[in-house]
Each structure stands twice: as C-alpha cells, then as structure tokens.
Amino acid sequence: MRQWRLIDSGEGDAFFNMAIDEAIALTVMNGANPPTLRFYGWRIPSVSLGYFQRIDDIDLAYCIECNVPVVRRPTGGRAILHGDELTYSFSAQNSDEFSRGLRETYNLIGNAFFSAFQMVGLDVEMMAKRQKGSMLTRSPLCFNSTSLGEISLKGIKLLGSAQRRWREGFLQQGSIPYSIDEGMMHAVFKVSPQNLINLKGLNSFINLNKEALKSAITEAFEKTFNVRLLLSHPSRKETLLAERLLEEKYLRPEWNLSRGHQGETFLMLNDSK
C-alpha cells in the first residue's frame, strides 16, 4: 500500500502558513516527499486573498487599524476571513490519479471530503452544475457562492478550496469554517455576508470537535486513494525553504498587495533540494 504524509501543524501566522504550504508543494513536486495532506489553523483572524484578486476587494485600512494580517495565497479563488476553522492543504505530483488535469483532481479530492462530512453525520451534497447570477461574479467572498464540484449543506458552501498547478504537480488549499464573525466579515469585505453556515450551531455537529473531523478526513483520504497516511512533520529542507519564501515573497507588500504578479519569479523546483 502506498504511504502518504499527514502533517498537523496547529495554529500559525498567516504569512508562514502560506510559505510552508508552498515549500511542501515544491518538495513534493520534485519527488523529495510523497503526496502530503496538511491540517492547520490561524493564530489570529487573518485574510487570505486569491492569487489574482484585487486588493480593493477588502478594506485594507480597517485590516491595518485592527491588526488583521492580509496575505496573498499562491492559489486562486476569492478572499477568506480565516478564524475559527479547519484549514487544509494537499500537494502531489501530476501522476497516477492526479494526471488528468485540474477539474478531475479537484473532484477526486472533493470526493474524499464529501465522504468525511458524511462520516460525521452531515447531510452534504456535491454541486453538479455551475451557479449562475450576480452573486457568483461580483462577490469578493469565497463563501458567498457555490459552484461546480463544491460541497454544500442545504445549498450553502461548506468547504472553500482553490488549486494551483505547475508542470510537475499541484497545491490545493481549503477552509472549513466552524463559526463566522459576521461583524468582522462585513468590515473587511465592505459587503454583507450571505448564505453562510455556522457549523457549531448544527445539531449534527454540536458534539463534534476538530480532532474528530480531522480523523474523519484522514480516514476518507485513505479509503478514497487506497493509501496510508503517516503522521509526520515538515522536513528541514521544507522549513528552510519556507523561511526563504517568507522573506522573499510572503512578507513583502509587493506580493500581498499586487494583483497578477506578472513579474513574479517562482523558485525553481531544484531550489528546494
């Protein structure tokens, strides 16, 4: 049976969370490590922007005044206010079951999460068609819309995910919110949040803690991909690479506040060896 890695990092700051996700993806893509599922959280409420998202989608002045870190993800999608949640990342090479492109890979990973939510008693569904309407095209919030292949509960998005693909492999990042600070979300995004689920208020979720959900996701990944996930830690190479990415990218305003990054130079895969 194939063996993949499981890393449970606990809570971290916004900038290092993104740096270590990319560092893990780079080492996985060059074959130094097997496919890796990572769980983590956020020390304080933080905003992550999608790779191509405009900075004026958020109230940056409010974030600065209230000490809400703003970081740009290496993956796409729209903004998320992170807080009381379970965040994950998954990295693998573009081979075996992940060799058929972004959509198929996204659906495979989605199937694993779909199974995990069912294990913990949530009556979820996977969207079979794209959502239409102004909410989908205009809202800067990730959780204000549900689209093809995404998991929802009562028609409302339960898991927000985005993927970035390179020639050798990919990184997918996602967020499962437990509770929503609607006041802070309104202040950050300058719009009223809509169609949000408070998992902690659901009868089927009241007695479920984060460790139980992580266990269900781990089991679902193992069954979906016929692998064994071994608990591990980032390697020294990954930690050093993350520190480099932190200094050269994720702590820099030109990365976090710019859109598109047409002049960006990514680390080559052999830089992580």
Image (cartoon, rainbow, N blue to C red):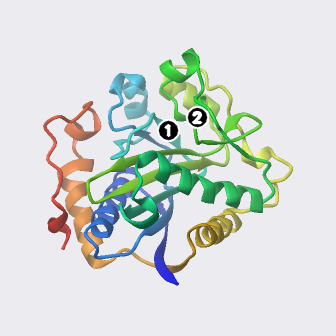
| Residue 115 shows up from this direction | yes
| Residue 177 horizontal/vertical position (percent) | 62, 46
Q: Earlier in the sequence, mark 1 or mark 2?
A: 1
Disc 1 crowd, CA 10 A, few/some/many (<14, 14-19, 20+)? many
| Residue 86 shows up from this direction | no
> Which residue sits at x=42%, y=33%?
63
Q: Is residue 26 left or right of residue 136?
A: left
> Which residue sits at x=60%, y=51%?
85
The amino acid type found where label 2 is placed reads Phe
> Which residue sits at x=52%, y=30%?
141
The amino acid type found where label 1 is placed reads Ile
Name the mark on residue 80. 1
Name the mark on residue 143. 2
Name the mark on residue 36. none
Q: Is residue 82 left or right of residue 27?
A: right
> Which residue sits at x=29%, y=70%?
239
Query: Rounded to the nearest whole Å, what is the CA distance between mark 1 and mark 2?
Result: 8 Å
Query: Are the residues flagged by discs 1 and 2 in contact, CB closer than 8 Å?
Result: yes
- Say what secondary structure mark 1 lies in: strand
The quarter holding residue 51 reads top left
| Residue 116 horizontal/vertical position (percent) | 68, 60
For discs 1 and 2, the disc positioned in front in the rendered view: 2
- Say what secondary structure mark 2 lies in: helix
Residue 148 drawn above or below residue 222: above
Q: Is residue 114 left or right of residue 163?
A: right
The quarter holding residue 113 reads bottom right
| Residue 76 horizontal/vertical position (percent) | 39, 39
Q: Residue furthest right?
A: 203
Residue 201 drawn above or below residue 238: above
Q: Nearer the viewer, residue 62 or 118?
A: 118
Q: Nearer the viewer, residue 7 or 252?
A: 7
